[in-house]
Image (cartoon, coloured by chain):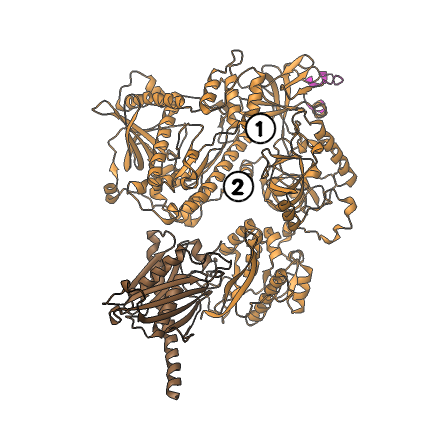
């Protein structure tokens, strides 16, 4: 399979360093404290945040800071083919990973003794699922008004014959590796790093640099969307 | 600039389970796809490929223009596109994607053309262009959409180029497409029309593939020779239901009308006999077959059918259809006559072809009796390929040339496939042309090294820097020497041995450090990887790496400092390896010895210098090592290779010598084996998933059947249960009256063996790593990196282990390594065949112009022929027993020089009785069995300048009416050199 044509274009017509088109919406539902929807190409994710609220099981309660829980799920046909076991080990592992990312980003000491729940649902997947989940959760947390140190943005990169490629689709990720980087863009610190396949150390740096750069691009995108949302909201509020 | 719009491509795909899933892929439209014309003005590309034209060569299109091609033109007329006079072509992305989908070899060739800057082929990514993107409409097939996309792209170009005063011509062979393009006011022509209109290149028309329309197929059904093929859907359905089977067709070597297919679910291969049952399938095609009812099952034919012989006998013009029928029945009779009485095998007929493996074929044109005809018959060099009908307007230029032809189609009403001429290789008999034929037929890359490859070489004068010295162990104080055949310039191994204070020996094998010069992923590395091996022809060597490396910097020549990758063992007096280590070193060889010189030194007791003594020690140790190896079950096999001594000026064979065997040869061999085994063990230990190893599978018992039958006929019992029992029973199988008997047996055993293969350790289970021939659990190649690419990979792995080098991604990827080993295996096999083919041609050349007598031994028996082995020239020749051809030879003889042939009484025609159960051919009282000694006469029938054939005739034992009298003994018969067994 030719991932990058000799003309320099990928299968879908992007250049190696080009992101897929990102579309997002904040505030879809009323019941959760915060909700958001994001499309990174054909990877589509819905996120809802409940909390900060009372801790359900008292033995988990921490009086110094809040408890963060994440539950991720995939709808049965998100990969094209219907899968019977939608909740498998991998999904659970990813849930923990996403929760871990936000441990680093939420000002936990602000909400002592309480709990924040993040529910993420993958509607369609085409590479970069973890990234889309992180980005959607960030938006939902912002919508919920949870205090964050910084945005958390995430992006993937892969490698194909010496060339690093940004925001890999499913096909591209399988042919190379899918390195997922989650970043606090204003602080410049990486909060999570994950790779689906082995990456040779000679190539690792190029892949990670590209993914980090991708995170910054994602940040620009998310930031402008949030800004637009707030202006919108503000306009409605002031109109009232 | 960048992405403009997002579209979704939707399609449905069937999964393995049979579920149908919907797949959605993104498709981005861009606004930065440029036209590629230098001086276009409105586009902003960096490297414009197309040039502005001022004149036109075509009479059809007087304006200066560029060409755009559609998919079918790219697929079928690739040879025209390869011609130097065709330049400046715009290839829409739609076309290149379709080509890739339909034929990978053509896609590769097309990509090569695009890459060569002189051709100026430009790929236009129309699918992502904002103005050229078209969506598939409802009720529109994918093909129609693609054609429309091409037309739209062409239209865009014609508008876009107006400002630059260029026009665009669409080349398409599809009539409907042509018409539709013209309604868009585009210029559209077929390839034939366009090429015919070119003023400056008249010969180009020969290259145009002539594709007949399928439409009139129904009209000519009466004349059809072959049944129609089934479509893909029908085949798939049939295979699913179990009615049809599929597999790769392998044409028999002896008989071009017989083939075998190995299909899933069958223990034995399925037989296919006769032209009609083969139904236009060629060697290596992937075919769908239908089993015949059991009563029609047959046995493999025991006759040898040579299509050239057939054709010659007929001597009629095969264009006559009635004649075709005659030949068909004749062929069938001949096949039937060869049907043995043995066990019947499943027999089938071809009903469809799933994948063609057509390639370009080398060969010659058959002289056509009718002058002025443009239709000619092409005789491929490969005996498994049928004749090809081609059209040429320049037959006189091609008669005495070796040419290349490609097949275009094989319609049902044509006995032979239709093709077109591609190019001339050279004159028949010319050394370079003959070599090129061999190289092309065996797919050996043999072009000169490109500029970019040569740029990777170190600059001369090459010096050893301090950094090098610091990184490497200095072993220049050791008495290292190399031992190689005479005239070897690519010396890749050297040895040393010294006594240690504790009574043990330190033995070192030093291998040229090629991986120091060939760095991964450079152009040089890629080229070496593609070539994979050096190819040795009798009069030419095609190097894997450029000469500077292979015969200079990497060659471990005497008295110069060279880089080596060394393996050093401590070995006890009983030849037990105590320890081993690898290191990168600098060595200085004390001398490049030949096997003979080394042997002389060892034998000469007066010489007591260090070098000679170390050679003696090595020799002693080697003998012990060999004994151990044999005890473990290693086989000693024989081949009938001979060495040709050539006169370099005239390129004629001066002398043929059987390869002599010296002790020093097995001395070097033993240590090379030990080095290879050590390398294999070390790499496997450190890289259990990605070590490149070499395995030799044990042959299945059925492989031994011909050997056992032949041995049985001589009352020899061979035990083939394991390699050890086989080796032992071979050792005792000797005949006092036939000194060559044992060698013969070993040669036949060699033919039963499987091919040894490279593989990646992660892809197989450890028990499969076994090397049957050498009886070692793991084996690899480490000792010849100059001429084998596998060794370079092993060197790189070892260098990582001793921390002298770094890994790179491809080295540790077991999937890539598995692909690479497949590629190397293929190249190795082909290089081997090429070497043999070259030896055969040289042997035939040495027979030319005289009648020579040889001693020979019966190898295989057939109903109408005996295959005999002629050790003197190291060849196998066929002695035909059927009288028809013989008579003709006699007739020819009558006309020609040999007066003795007149004495042969032609009235007596001996009959031969063939028994395939007990394996003998009987003629009167005389019985011929395998291994029997025959004296034969060989000459080259040069009556046809184009095609020279070896004529083989029996001299002794005398069969009246068949054998010929011996030519007077004083003819220059080379003495049979005794071949060491």
| Chain where mark 2 sits | B
Is B84 in front, or is B326? Answer: B326
Write down the colour of chain B: orange
Does any portion of residue B671 appear in the rendered image? Answer: yes
Residue B577 falls in image quadrant: top left
Question: Neighbour class for label 1 at 10 Å: few (<14), some, many (≥20)?
Answer: some
Check the rendered structure and report the hue given to chain A: brown
Quadrant where the N terminus of chain B sits is bottom left
Say which chain tag 1 marks: B
Q: Secondary structure at mark 1?
A: helix
Q: Which mark is residue B443?
A: 2
Q: Which mark is residue B844?
A: 1
In the image, is residue B899 part of the stretch drawn in magenta? Answer: yes
Residue B137 location (% of width, % of height): 62, 67
SS at mark 2? loop
User: Residue drawn at (71%, 27%), measured in percent from left and top?
Assistant: B337
Which tag is nearer the camera, tag 2 or tag 1? 2
Left or right for A138, reference B376 = left
B430 lies above or below A163: above
Residue B899 visible somewhere in the drawing: no
* On screen, residue A124 above or below B346: below
Which comes sooner in the sequence, label 2 or label 1?
A: 2
Q: Position of residue B187 (x, y in %)?
A: 64, 65
- Main SS type for the magenta part? loop
Extreme-front residue of the structure: A58
Residue A235 image-quadrant placement:
bottom left
Q: Which residues are magenta?
A: B894-910
Q: How far from the left and from the top, in percent, is residue A234?
A: 37, 83
């Amino acid at each position: 399979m030719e991932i990058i044509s000799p003309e320099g274009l990928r299968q879908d017509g992007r250049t190696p360093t080009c992101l897929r088109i990102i579309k997002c919406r904040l505030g879809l539902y009323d019941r959760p404290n915060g909700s958001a929807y994001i499309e990174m190409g054909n990877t589509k994710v819905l996120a809802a945040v409940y909390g900060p609220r009372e801790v359900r099981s008292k033995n988990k309660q921490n009086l110094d800071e809040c408890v963060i829980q994440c539950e991720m799920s995939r709808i049965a046909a998100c990969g094209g083919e219907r899968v019977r076991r939608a909740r498998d080990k991998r999904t659970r592992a990813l849930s923990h990973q996403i929760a871990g990312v936000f441990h680093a980003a939420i000002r936990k000491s602000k909400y002592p003794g309480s709990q924040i729940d993040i529910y993420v649902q993958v509607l369609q997947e085409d590479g970069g699922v973890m990234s889309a989940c992180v980005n959607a959760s960030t938006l939902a947390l912002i919508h919920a008004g949870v205090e964050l140190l910084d945005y958390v943005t995430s992006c993937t990169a892969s490698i194909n014959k010496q060339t690093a490629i940004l925001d890999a689709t499913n096909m591209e990720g399988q042919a190379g590796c899918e390195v997922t980087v989650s970043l606090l863009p204003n602080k410049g610190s990486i909060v999570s790093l994950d790779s689906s396949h082995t990456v040779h150390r000679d190539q690792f740096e190029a892949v990670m640099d590209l993914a980090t750069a991708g995170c910054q691009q994602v940040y620009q995108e998310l930031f402008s969307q949030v800004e637009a949302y707030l202006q919108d909201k503000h306009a409605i509020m002031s109109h009232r | 600039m960048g992405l403009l719009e997002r579209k979704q491509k939707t399609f449905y795909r069937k999964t393995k389970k049979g579920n149908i899933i919907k797949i959605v892929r993104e498709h981005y439209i861009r606004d930065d796809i440029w036209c590629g014309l230098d001086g276009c003005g409105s586009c902003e590309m960096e490297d414009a490929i197309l040039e502005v034209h001022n004149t036109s060569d075509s009479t059809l299109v007087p304006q200066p223009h560029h060409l755009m091609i559609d998919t079918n033109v790219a697929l079928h007329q690739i040879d025209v596109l390869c011609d130097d006079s065709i330049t400046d072509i715009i290839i829409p992305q739609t076309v290149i994607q379709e080509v890739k989908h339909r034929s990978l070899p053509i896609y590769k060739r097309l990509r090569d053309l695009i890459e060569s800057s002189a051709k100026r082929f430009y790929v236009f990514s129309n699918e992502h262009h904002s103005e050229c993107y078209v969506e598939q409409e409802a009720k529109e097939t994918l093909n129609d959409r693609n054609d429309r996309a091409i037309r739209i792209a062409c239209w865009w170009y014609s508008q876009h180029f107006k400002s630059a005063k260029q026009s665009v011509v669409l080349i398409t062979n599809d009539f409907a497409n042509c018409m539709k393009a013209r309604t868009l006011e585009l210029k559209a022509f077929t390839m034939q029309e366009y090429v015919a209109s070119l003023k400056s290149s008249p010969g180009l028309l020969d290259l145009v593939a002539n594709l007949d329309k399928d439409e009139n197929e129904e009209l000519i059904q009466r004349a059809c020779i072959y049944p129609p093929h089934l479509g893909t859907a029908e085949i798939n359905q049939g295979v699913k239901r179990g009615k049809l089977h599929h597999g790769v067709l392998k044409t028999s070597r002896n008989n071009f009308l017989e083939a075998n297919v190995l299909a899933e679910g069958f223990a034995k291969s399925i037989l296919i006999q006769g032209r009609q049952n083969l139904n236009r399938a060629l060697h290596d095609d992937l075919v769908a077959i239908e089993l015949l009812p059991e009563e029609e099952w047959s046995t493999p034919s025991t006759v040898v059918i040579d299509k050239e012989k057939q054709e010659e006998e007929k001597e009629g013009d095969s264009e006559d259809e009635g004649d075709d029928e005659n030949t068909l029945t004749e062929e069938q009779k001949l096949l039937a006559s060869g049907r043995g009485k043995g066990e019947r095998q499943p027999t089938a007929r071809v009903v469809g072809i799933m994948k063609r493996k057509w390639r370009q074929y080398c060969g010659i044109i058959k002289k056509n009796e009718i002058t002025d005809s443009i239709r000619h018959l092409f005789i491929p060099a490969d005996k498994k390929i049928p004749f090809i009908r081609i059209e040429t307007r320049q037959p006189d230029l091609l008669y005495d040339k070796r040419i290349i032809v490609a097949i275009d189609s094989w319609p049902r009403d044509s006995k032979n496939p239709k093709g077109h001429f591609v190019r001339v290789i050279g004159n028949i008999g010319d050394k370079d042309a003959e070599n090129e034929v061999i190289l092309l037929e065996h797919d050996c890359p043999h072009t000169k090294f490109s500029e970019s490859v040569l740029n990777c070489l170190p600059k001369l004068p090459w010096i050893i820097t301090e950094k090098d010295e610091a990184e490497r162990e200095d072993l220049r104080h050791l008495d290292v020497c190399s031992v190689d055949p005479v005239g070897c310039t690519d010396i890749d191994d050297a040895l040393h041995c010294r006594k240690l204070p504790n009574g043990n020996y330190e033995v070192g094998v030093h291998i040229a450090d090629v991986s120091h010069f060939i760095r991964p992923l450079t152009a040089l590395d890629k080229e070496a990887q593609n070539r994979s091996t050096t190819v040795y022809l009798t009069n030419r060597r095609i190097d894997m790496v450029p000469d500077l490396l292979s015969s200079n910097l990497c060659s471990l020549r005497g008295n110069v400092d060279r880089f080596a990758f060394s393996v050093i063992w401590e070995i006890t007096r009983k030849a037990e390896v105590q320890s081993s280590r690898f290191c990168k070193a600098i060595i200085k060889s004390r001398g490049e010895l030949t096997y003979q010189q080394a042997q002389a030194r060892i034998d000469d007791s007066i010489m007591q210098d260090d070098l000679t003594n170390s050679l003696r020690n090595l020799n002693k140790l080697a003998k012990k090592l060999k004994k151990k190896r044999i005890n473990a079950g290693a086989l000693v096999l024989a081949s009938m290779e001979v060495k040709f001594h050539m006169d370099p000026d005239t390129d004629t064979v001066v002398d043929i010598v059987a390869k002599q065997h010296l002790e020093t040869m097995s001395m070097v061999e033993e240590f090379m084996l030990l080095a290879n085994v050590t390398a294999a063990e070390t790499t496997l230990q450190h890289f259990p998933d990605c070590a490149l190893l070499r395995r030799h599978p044990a042959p299945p018992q059925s492989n031994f059947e011909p050997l056992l039958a032949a041995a049985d006929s001589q009352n020899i019992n061979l035990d083939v249960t394991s390699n050890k029992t086989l080796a032992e029973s071979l050792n005792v199988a000797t005949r006092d009256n036939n000194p060559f008997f044992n060698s013969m047996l070993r040669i036949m055993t060699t033919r039963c063996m499987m091919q040894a293969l490279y593989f990646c350790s992660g892809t197989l289970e450890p028990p499969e790593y076994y090397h049957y021939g050498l009886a070692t659990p793991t084996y690899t190649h480490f000792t010849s990196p100059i001429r084998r690419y596998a060794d370079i990979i092993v060197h790189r792995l070892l260098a990582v282990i001793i921390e002298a080098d770094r890994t790179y991604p491809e080295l540790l990827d077991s999937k890539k390594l598995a692909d690479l080993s497949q590629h190397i295996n293929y190249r190795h096999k082909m290089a081997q065949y090429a070497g043999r083919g070259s030896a055969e041609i040289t042997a035939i050349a040495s027979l030319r112009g005289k009648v020579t007598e040889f001693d020979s031994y019966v190898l295989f028996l057939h109903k109408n022929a005996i295959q005999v082995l002629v050790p003197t020239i190291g060849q196998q020749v066929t002695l035909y027993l059927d009288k028809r051809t013989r008579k003709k030879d006699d007739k020819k003889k009558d006309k020609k020089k040999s007066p003795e042939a007149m004495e042969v009484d032609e009235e007596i025609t001996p009959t031969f009785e063939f028994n395939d159960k007990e394996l003998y051919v009987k003629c009167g009282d005389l019985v011929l069995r395998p291994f029997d000694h025959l004296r034969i006469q060989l000459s080259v029938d040069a009556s046809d300048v184009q095609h020279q054939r070896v004529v083989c005739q029996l001299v002794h034992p005398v069969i009246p009416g068949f054998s010929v009298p011996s030519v007077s003994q004083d003819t220059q018969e080379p003495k049979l050199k005794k071949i060491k067994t």
